[in-house]
């Protein structure tokens, strides 16, 4: 970097080299929950080989991966788990929302399904389909590689923060006007266990 | 031999029919015995306690030998068509030796407790937990009556007819629960004060 | 753990709480097994499910019968055709409709094909967990072949939604019989290769024999069904005991194991795949020509050509899809022998286009309950092998 801040030739080439290395060796962390997980497995296996594009090393540890493929429906019970995994990944990291369920909730607009993982984390590529065929996932990865190459990034205002994620997972109480007449407490469980042991 | 989905093979139908006649003679006194669309018998009992005694009798009976529990479920009887009480508890039994099915239904009121059959069938453990989770029917003497499909702190019972399908439930401390006592980098006081 | 957290003995307490958590390397889906571990021995296990609870049963009360067909694919997504057909069968039973001959044979072909692909997944993932990756690559190629055939039938590989109430959505393509013959000729060779790789492999036998044993009494007590029940020695197969469709006319053997361990389940699944190929060959030979749709006006979805040209047919089509079919009051519990076990649909209808209660009795639910009990006392690697062999599909488990 020269004194007035403009890039020198060497760092630019280094930047390009870094991007080339990143895009051609995206190590996926497959987070397959449901049907899209099976199609992801098909993509990773021999017929539609994903390792052609550098994404061979599927790392099931988030600390060793840089691309998170969320394949399948994410429920409100699973959301904190997914957010934890996302937080454990190191920068730079990219997220692919594979399938309709992780993009927008899919066909499940119910009380327990997250309507898209972009409620809790920023997503780079959405893959439509239910489930998307393996060529679709490959297209998404190529698109992501393109995106890394061009240095495209979402505007900072669109990226949900950790507090947004918290808000999404803790919904507004005003929706719920069900009064709980029975609250399951530890005392009740102990009482039941005791009476079961007596019998 | 021609078969279809409604009229199955001859040997199996005759066995089920002879079972139905013996069931009528033996167990149907004072109880309503119906036959559903597949000619499988449905025995209505008066309350949940009787359901448990009947299930026990079915397992011990040398003729029927219902040794396999297929399913325990329930449905909401909110419009009162099957009786006055709120829920209908359904037990599906099967006999592996006689190869016949039997369904036992009991009417359970909203504040009433049903009786757990985990001492007869260990398989009933999770099935009854699911009925509790989805409907709110509690089972006496169940070793582990907690929610199974929903989160532990969920209030409300989803499969009841008045529960709207899109209504979510807030979990104020869901993050703290799953991330342990110290979540990653959030200030717990501000997170709670935002509600 | 220990009552007194400050005591010195707590330091020497060997028990550790380990989470085979919802995010699983073994790609089994969203299950959680909390184990209290002493060294590597699991002293106590507590399983938690519900991480994929998508309220499919509640949606059954919200959607019409035809609309809900889509959700049945997502139950056991490894063998979606089977679920579609089981559900169509349950609604047809409720309405008192019996489908045509050709439809029955096509449905049996679909069910056996889905049995093959589900068993492939189970054996391949089980082998992958224990390190035998070659089996995974080998068998997945055949899964793609089966997918290509399924795609030629209904247009979609995985979530097929092929069956309709009263018939099937499309007839088989013209060259399907030849392709099915080719599949039936070549697929058993892959099974021979897998057998050569695994069955007498010292490492495989050491890892899977006497591991995850579920005894005969336990299997019946925990109401498990399917290949796991048969591997434990119980001779129970709904295709033979309570037959449906054309199974009485087909010649096949029911595979029963002896020990109930992982090795037996693997052998039972391999042999069941061979029996399924045998059934497919017979179906291919005996497949009759004829109408695909039952001629019942309540459910028969008319041909598109007629819908676009005749007025009454257009209105009929409109009524079926906008209002839904009118199912009479009643209930039915229909079980089929799915690849994973006894899949049952308990449909309660109070008349009208929507069900009053749509209950799915899934085999994985009971299997996971049995797993929770049988994993206690074993070691963690054994738990992984056991989990792979029991074939828990999370979509079916949580619905």
Image (cartoon, coloured by chain):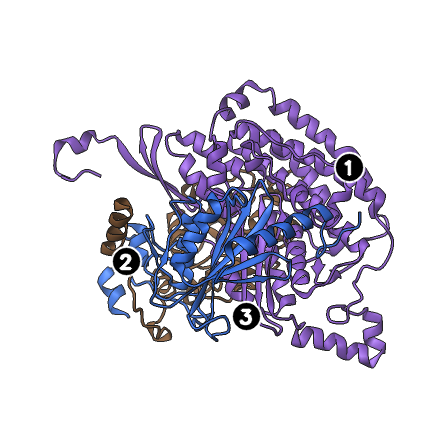
Chain colours: A brown, B blue, C purple
Reading the image, the residue beneath label 2 is B186
Q: Which residue occupies the foreground of this view, B47 or B142?
A: B47
Taking C345 as reference, is C126 above or below it?
Answer: above
Q: Which residue occupies the foreground of this view, C99 or C185?
A: C99
**Residue A32: horizontal and vertical position, in percent?**
51, 48
Label pair 1/2, CB-CB below 8 angstroms: no
Reading the image, the residue beneath label 1 is C184
User: Does the image show residue C382?
Assistant: yes
**Residue A52: horizontal and vertical position, in percent?**
63, 40
Q: Is residue A165 left or right of residue C298?
A: left
Q: Which residue occupies the foreground of this view, A135 or C227?
A: C227
Helix, strand or loop under label 2: loop
Q: Nearest to the eye among marks 1 and 2: give it.
A: 1
Q: Is residue C46 left or right of residue C323?
A: left
Q: Residue at x 47, y 74 (%)?
A: B80
Instruction: Say if labels 1 and 2 share a chain.
Output: no
**Residue B125: horizontal and vertical position, in percent?**
40, 48
Taking A177 as reference, is B140 above or below it?
Answer: above
Which of the 4 image quarters holds residue A171?
bottom left
Reading the image, the residue beneath label 3 is C62
Count of numbered marks: 3
| CA distance separating discs 3 and 2 | 39 Å
Q: Which residue occupies the foreground of this view, C127 or C327?
A: C327
**Circle 1 Cα neighbour tier, 10 Å, few/some/many (<14 / 14–19 / ≥20):** some
* Disc 1: host chain: C
Label pair 3/1, CB-CB below 8 angstroms: no
């Amino acid at each position: 970097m020269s004194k007035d801040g403009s890039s020198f030739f060497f760092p630019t080439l280094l930047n390009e080299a870094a991007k080339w290395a990143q895009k051609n060796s995206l190590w996926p962390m497959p987070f397959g929950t449901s049907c899209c997980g099976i199609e992801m497995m098909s993509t990773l296996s021999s017929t539609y080989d994903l390792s052609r594009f550098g994404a061979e090393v599927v790392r099931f540890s988030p600390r060793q991966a840089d691309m998170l493929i969320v394949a399948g429906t994410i429920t409100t019970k699973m959301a904190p788990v997914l957010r934890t995994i996302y937080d454990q990944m190191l920068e730079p990291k990219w997220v692919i929302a594979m399938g309709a369920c992780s993009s927008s909730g899919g066909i499940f607009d119910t009380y327990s399904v997250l309507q898209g993982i972009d409620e809790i984390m920023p997503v780079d590529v959405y893959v439509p389909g239910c489930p998307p065929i393996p060529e679709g996932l490959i297209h998404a990865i190529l698109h992501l590689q393109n995106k890394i190459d061009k240095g495209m990034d979402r505007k900072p205002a669109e990226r949900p923060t950790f507090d947004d994620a918290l808000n999404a997972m803790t919904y507004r109480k005003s929706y719920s006007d069900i009064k709980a007449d029975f609250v399951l407490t530890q005392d009740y469980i102990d009482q039941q266990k005791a009476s079961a042991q007596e019998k | 031999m021609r078969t279809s989905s409604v009229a199955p093979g001859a040997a199996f139908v005759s066995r089920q029919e002879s079972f139905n006649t013996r069931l009528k003679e033996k167990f149907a006194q004072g109880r309503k015995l119906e036959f559903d669309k597949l000619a499988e018998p449905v025995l209505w009992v008066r309350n949940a306690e009787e359901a448990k005694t009947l299930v026990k009798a079915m397992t011990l009976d040398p003729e029927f030998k219902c040794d396999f529990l297929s399913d325990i479920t329930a449905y909401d009887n909110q419009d009162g068509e099957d009786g006055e009480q709120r829920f209908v508890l359904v037990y599906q039994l099967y006999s592996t030796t006689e190869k016949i099915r039997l369904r036992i239904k009991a009417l359970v009121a909203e504040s009433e407790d049903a009786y757990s059959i985990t001492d007869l069938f260990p398989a009933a453990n999770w099935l009854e937990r699911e009925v509790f989770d989805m409907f709110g029917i509690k089972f006496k003497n169940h070793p582990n009556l907690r929610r199974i499909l929903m989160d532990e702190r969920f209030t409300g019972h989803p499969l009841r007819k008045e529960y709207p399908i899109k209504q979510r439930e807030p979990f104020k401390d869901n993050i703290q629960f799953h991330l342990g006592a110290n979540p990653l980098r959030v200030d717990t006081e501000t997170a709670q004060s935002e509600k | 753990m220990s009552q007194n957290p400050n005591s010195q003995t707590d330091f020497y307490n060997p028990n550790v709480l380990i989470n085979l958590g919802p995010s699983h390397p073994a790609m089994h889906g969203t299950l959680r097994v909390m184990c209290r571990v002493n060294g590597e021995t699991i002293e106590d296990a507590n399983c938690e499910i519900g991480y994929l609870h998508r309220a499919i049963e509640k949606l059954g009360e919200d959607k019409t019968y035809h609309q809900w067909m889509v959700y049945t694919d997502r139950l056991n997504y490894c063998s979606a055709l089977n679920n579609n057909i089981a559900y169509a069968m349950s609604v047809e039973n409720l309405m008192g409709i019996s489908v045509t001959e050709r439809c029955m044979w096509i449905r049996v072909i679909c069910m056996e094909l889905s049995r093959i692909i589900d068993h492939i997944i189970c054996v391949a993932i089980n082998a992958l967990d224990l390190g035998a990756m070659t089996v995974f690559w080998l068998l997945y190629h055949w899964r793609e072949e089966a997918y290509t055939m399924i795609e030629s039938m209904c247009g979609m590989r995985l979530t097929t939604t092929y069956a309709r109430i009263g018939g099937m959505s499309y007839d088989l393509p013209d060259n399907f019989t030849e392709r099915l013959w080719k599949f039936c000729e070549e697929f058993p060779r892959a099974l021979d290769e897998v057998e050569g790789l695994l069955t007498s492999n010292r490492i495989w036998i050491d890892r899977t024999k006497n591991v995850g044993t579920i005894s005969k009494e336990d299997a019946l007590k925990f109401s498990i069904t399917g290949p796991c029940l048969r591997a434990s020695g119980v001779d129970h197969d709904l295709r033979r005991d309570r037959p449906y469709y054309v199974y009485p006319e087909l010649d096949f053997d029911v595979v029963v194991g002896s020990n109930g361990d992982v090795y037996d389940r693997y052998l039972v699944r391999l042999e069941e795949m061979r029996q399924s190929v045998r059934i497919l060959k017979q179906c291919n030979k005996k497949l009759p020509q004829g109408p695909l749709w039952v001629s019942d006006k309540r459910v028969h979805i008319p041909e598109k050509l007629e819908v676009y040209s005749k007025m009454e047919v257009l209105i009929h089509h409109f009524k079926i899809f906008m209002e839904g079919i009118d199912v009479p009051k009643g209930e039915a519990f229909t079980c089929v022998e799915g690849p994973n076990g006894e899949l049952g649909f308990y449909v309660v209808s109070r008349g009208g286009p929507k069900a009053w209660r749509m209950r799915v009795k899934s085999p994985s639910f009971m299997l996971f309950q049995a797993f929770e009990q049988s994993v206690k006392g074993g070691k963690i690697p054994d738990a992984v092998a056991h989990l792979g062999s029991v074939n828990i599909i999370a979509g079916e488990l949580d619905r």
